[in-house]
Structures are given as structure tokens and as C-alpha cells.
Image: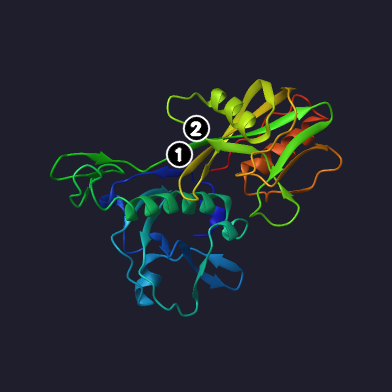
């Protein structure tokens, strides 16, 4: 079945491995945090279990992901081995645009679950080896009954604007001339809006008002949920947090620097804000995943 046909089906999540036909399930298998794919004449594709096993690749205990119509999906990890054609590995970020949006979203879900599976092998309370729970994505300690669920770390990301300008920042590890939005993790006991105000004040020294929720995006690097906002500059002078940022500046809308790739919600927010200058009623685009 082609991905064109598969995109007609919604992705239905399910943790029930007994409902998965493992013999033909499509596989999101990670080796050293890189996704194993098959190189074809038209690009790359996720392998199914038949292709993996006939190629001599035996992934560890699979995790059920769900299905798109008649096609089932699993996540798994594989010990480091030498791959031969047509198999190869690819960084998940680099797979954006090479896989369909639906396929990329499924691979992102798989990456988070594979990471969770690898990092929850022992109970954090009593150090007993954990057991998977069959009816949901969780692990149980057979000794003290403590349960662990896939970790999701919420983080805000915010476009700060004033008349004809937006405030952009850059981290020293980014490619030259790449800028993005202020972002940061939500702390314990903190609302999303309070996090926006705190992170903006800490990172660039200004105050904002008119905070408006836009949308969110799962960010499987390794387990964030990015929550996007728009905020209006209120007052204050730019003073950057040098432990986090290399530079921050106000940019005219017609003279923006290099931006994050289209994969990120940061870029979606900026592109939407630019388009909104000609159409103030333009809704923020729905996340495709």
C-alpha cells in the first residue's frame, strides 16, 4: 500500500501488542538514536518486519504504536550492527521532508517511546528491573508497584513582537546566522503563561503582555512538547542571558536573518506571523502530527 493511499487513514494509537500483526508490521527501529530506513529508487521508506528479518536484523522487544487503516506500526531498538544495502540509518531531523508528514509523525512518536523504553529499565524508587504493562504505554515495578509512563517535558516557545519588528535569538551551537524564538522549559508549579513571562525576562531582559496561545508540537529530541505563543513587547531593554544565548536583536519583518527549518513550530509561528500582516484573520495552522 502506498503512502498516498495510507494518508487517507488517520493514525490510531494503540499500546496493545497483541493487536499488531508483527510479521508484516511497519517498523520504526532505532540504532544509536538513528532511524533505520530502506533506500529505494524514489527515496527512503520505513522497513516492515519481513524486510528486517530476511535481512538478518532482529530488533529488541517491540512496542506497539498503532495503525493506519490495515497497516500496523511498531517501535523498537537494535544493537549496533553493520548495515548492508538497502538498509541505512538517518538522523530523525534529517528525515523531515523525506518521509511523508504522517510517516514522520509516527516516527517521532516511536522515537520518544524507544527512548523511554531504554531509560526506564529499572524502578527509580527501589532499583528493581521493571516490567512492561500490556494494556498501555507504562512500566510497573514488580516489587513496589511504582509505575512509569513515557516522559513528556513541556516547553514554551514565543514570538515577541512590536511595531514592524520581532525579537529573535540565537544559541552559539547553531549554524551561522540562524535565529529562532525565545524558548524554555516549564518549571514545577508554573503555568504556561507564567513560564512565557519568566523565560522572556530571564533570556532577553524584557517584559511582555498580550500573551496568546497559538498551537503545540511534539518534539521528539528526546521528549519535549513545544507550546507556541505570541506576545507583545511591553517594556525593558535587551539584556541576554549569556549562559544560554549568543545574541538577540529586534529585526524588521522585511529583513529577517536565517531561520529554523520548516520542521519546527518556531518556523511555523514566524511564517504565520508574516502572512498575518496581509490577512489579520488568518488562523494559526493546525499541527499535522
Q: Position of residue 196 (x, y in %)?
A: 59, 28
Q: Secondary structure at mark 1?
A: strand
Q: Nearer the viewer, residue 96 or 11?
A: 96
Of tags 2 and 1, the one toward the viewer is 2
Q: Nearer the viewer, residue 29 or 21?
A: 29
Residue positioned 77% across, 34% down in the render: 166
**In the picture provided, is 73 more to the left or to the right than 255?**
left
Callout 1 environment at 10 Å: few (<14), some (14 to 19), or many (20+)? some
Q: Nearer the viewer, residue 192 or 228?
A: 192
Query: Which residue is under mark 2?
Result: 186
Residue positioned 63% across, 36% down in the render: 203
Instruction: Determine which of the numbered discs, if any, sits on residue 18 in the image.
Output: none
Determine whether 235 is above or below 63 in the image. Answer: above
Residue positioned 68% across, 49% down in the render: 260
Query: Which residue is under mark 1?
Result: 153
Tell me the distance, in whole angstroms, between the alpha carbons under discs 2 and 1: 8 Å
Dots 2, 1 in contact, CB < 8 A: yes
Q: Position of residue 153 (x, y in %)?
A: 45, 39
Q: Quadrant of residue 82?
A: bottom left
Amino acid at each position: 500500500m502506498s503512502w498516498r493511499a495510507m494518508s487517507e487513514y488517520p493514525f490510531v494509537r494503540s499500546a496493545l501488542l497483541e493487536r499488531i500483526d508483527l510479521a508484516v508490521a511497519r517498523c520504526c527501529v532505532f540504532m544509536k538514536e538513528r532511524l533505520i530506513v530502506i533506500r529505494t529508487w524514489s527515496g527512503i521508506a520505513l522497513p516492515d518486519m519481513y524486510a528486517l528479518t530476511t535481512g538478518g536484523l532482529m530488533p529488541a522487544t517491540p512496542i506497539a504504536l498503532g495503525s493506519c487503516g490495515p497497516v500496523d506500526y511498531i517501535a523498537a531498538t537494535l544493537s549496533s550492527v553493520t548495515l548492508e544495502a538497502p538498509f541505512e540509518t538517518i538522523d530523525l531531523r534529517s528525515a523531515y521532508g523525506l518521509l511523508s508528514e504522517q510517516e514522520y509523525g509516527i516516527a517521532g512518536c516511536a522515537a520518544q517511546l524507544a527512548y523511554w523504553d531504554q531509560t526506564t529499565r529499572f524502578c527509580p524508587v527501589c532499583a528493581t528491573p521493571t516490567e512492561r504493562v500490556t494494556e498501555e504505554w507504562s512500566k510497573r515495578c514488580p516489587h513496589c508497584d511504582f509505575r512509569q509512563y513515557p516522559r513528556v517535558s513541556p516547553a514554551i516557545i514565543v514570538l515577541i513582537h512590536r511595531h514592524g519588528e520581532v525579537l529573535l535569538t540565537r544559541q552559539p551551537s547553531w549554524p551561522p546566522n540562524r535565529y529562532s524564538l525565545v524558548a524554555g522549559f516549564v518549571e514545577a508549579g508554573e503555568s504556561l503563561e507564567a513560564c512565557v513571562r519568566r523565560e522572556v525576562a530571564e533570556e532577553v531582559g524584557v517584559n511582555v503582555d498580550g500573551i496568546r496561545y497559538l498551537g503545540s508540537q511534539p518534539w521528539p529530541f528526546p521528549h519535549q512538547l513545544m507550546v507556541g505563543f505570541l506576545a507583545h513587547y511591553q517594556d525593558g531593554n535587551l539584556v541576554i542571558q549569556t549562559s544560554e544565548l549568543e545574541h538577540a536583536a529586534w529585526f524588521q519583518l522585511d529583513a529577517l536573518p536565517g531561520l529554523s527549518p520548516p520542521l519546527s513550530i518556531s518556523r511555523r509561528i514566524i511564517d504565520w506571523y508574516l502572512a498575518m500582516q496581509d490577512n489579520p484573520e488568518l488562523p494559526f495552522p493546525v499541527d499535522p502530527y
